[in-house]
Amino acid sequence: MSGNNLPPVSTAVHMLRDNGITSVRLYAPDSAALAALGGTGISVMVGVPNNVFPSLATSAPAAAAWVGANINAHPAVSFRYLVVGNEVAGSDTRYLVPAMENVRRALAAAGLGGAIKVTTAISQATIAVHVPPSAGEFTNASKPFLLPVLQFLKRTGAPLLANLYPYFLYTSNPRNMDISFALFTAPATVVQDGKYGYQNMFHASVDAVHAAGERLGVSGVDVVVSETGWPSAGGKAASVQNARTYNQNLVNHVGKGTPRRPRKVETYVLAMFNENLKENGVEQNWGLFYPNTNRVYPITFGYPVPLAMTIGVCYGVVANNLPPANEVVQLYRSKGLTGMRIYFADAKALSALRGSGIGLILDVGGTDVLASLAANASNAANWVRDNVRPYYPAVNIKYIAAGNEVLGGDTQNIVPAIRNLNAALAGAGLGAIKVSTSIRFDAVTNTFPPSNGVFAQAYMTDVARLLASTGAPLLANVYPYFAYKDNPRDIQLNYATFRPGTTVRDQNNGLTYTCLFDAMVDALVAALERAGAPGVRVVVSESGWPSASGFAATADNARAYNQGLIDHVGGGTPKRPGALETYIFAMFNENFKTGQLTEKHFGLFNPDKSPAYPIQFR
């Protein structure tokens, strides 16, 4: 915001929303900006400025007052990170960890300790070695203060923020780096680092930061790129064309991750606007927009598969106290949720979904319905006539699930039901709707290492090959919670809940796993390959974690798992990078659920529509 000609913050926030930008970084808690961001759902990274945080290091009451004035005062803002200092150097580094500790305690006292992570942003100048990435190392001057910072981040589950600029690495050494390596345009591998090949400097720098942390003895801390970009004027190689090339390629690449970590890299582009009060030269020309709100150059925001499209939520109704269906659909829309699963052809839900654009998994219902659909084609045609044709396309029905977690003799009905439903849909001119079935994870056996996965029963081979012939995905209910609950001796809680700290290597193919969810999904992928259906896509039709009434069922664990899931699935798994369509179970806590008490507590929301715990949909 270093400009005297910038548009009003309300205009800037509208521009963020109009361009599909879902996260923003503020370098200080500007009250006008925070007021404009309230209620938008835009995720906010807010800074404790360098001239402020030392005073918070020496006074816990001062930290509490700062949090009260700048965080608690804006309850409608979706705060994600609180950044203590930006590119801190010199003697002030001694205040970093004490300030972070005091701020974290202040957030915890305000009931926000699980929702907002406390971290700091480091300069690219703290990195002594970028290439090869595996040799990544921090400078000798930065190691003494970065080690306790990294230890704090690992202990609290927060990421390290890093400002990474291939532009400066290139312009400081153009004789030894081709500009194509900096701009993501190199036609082939430029740096071979063991089995990993690098075609761009951005990926190399990100992996170098990870390696530098590991070299200090701290592994498992995620890296968020808190600044990167390319100037459009004012210096060497600073042109509109180069800026557009870098930033568009950046947007297109970050959803895929790096060679060593093929999952989404959370990244913030510097900057929204050209800022005329910055130092003359390139510093005034990092903006994507001019202050008059015109674009500096054309750019398309969002991953190749928008992250919002990868997350849906299951709408279960086993309760007597849930809000009306129309209010439920409005809640989905207000949270930016673009996917829903319902477990039978609920006319109220289907009617409420008309015109919403929400993509739907529509279950056929219980095993009695499945048997009827399998029995003859006319039953399937009648079901489509009654439950699909009256609603589609006003309701965006993507998949029909012929059975959910079908067991025993009922499994013989899956394939004929799918065949009959496909024929009925084709006869009605609705062949765009794909028919599948939703399986329990234990339909796969030999799941460790993931590459050993194989279907436990022969019927699944027939299902997989049928799906391959129709282009439908396999729907799978994947619950790391139950895997952890059944085997806490061998499975670490952090590995099950997307927290850092555990790495597992598949010795058969060399792939590395940092979360149980990925390992489970890739075991499904391996089973599909062994069944002769390697091209079948996996859609995770249920996943979640209970927040009460059972082993490891706490609000903190549920929030960690579901927030981690939301943040993670845009990057896919080690074996299948790319967006992984996933549906969280469930929208609400359901008081009529039977079985274990935890079954009543999988909801993201209470029946009164209040959050069961803080969560950010992105």
Image: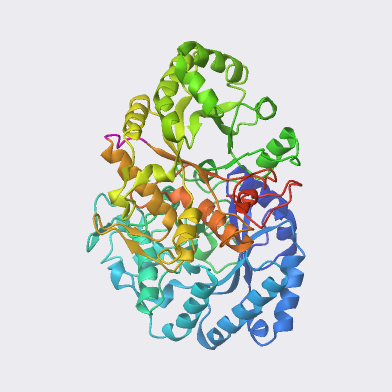
Tell me the residue at 57%/27% (across/down): 396
Whether 577 is drawn above or below 421: the answer is: below
**Residue 360 magenta-highlighted:** no
Q: Where is residue 401? Give x, y as percent.
A: 50, 30
Is 570 displayed left or right of 599 in the figure? left
Is 401 displayed left or right of 444 in the figure? right
Q: Nearer the viewer, residue 167 or 192?
A: 192
Q: Where is residue 105? Give x, y as percent.
A: 66, 76
Whether 269 is drawn above or below 27: the answer is: above
Q: Nearer the viewer, residue 540 or 91?
A: 540
- For residue 306, say whether it is visible: no
The scheme the figure's colours follow is rainbow
- Total marks shown come to 0
Tell me the residue at 63%/39% (across/down): 316
**Dividing the image into 4 quarters, which one contains the N terminus?**
bottom right
Q: Where is residue 381? Give x, y as percent.
A: 51, 13
- For residue 438, say whether it is visible: yes
Main SS class of the magenta portion in the image: loop
Residue 171 picture quarter: bottom left
Tell me the residue at 51%/57% (across/down): 269
Q: Where is residue 486? Give x, y as percent.
A: 46, 58
Q: Nearer the viewer, residue 431 or 55?
A: 431
Span of residues in magenta? 532-536
Tell me the residue at 25%/59% (across/down): 507
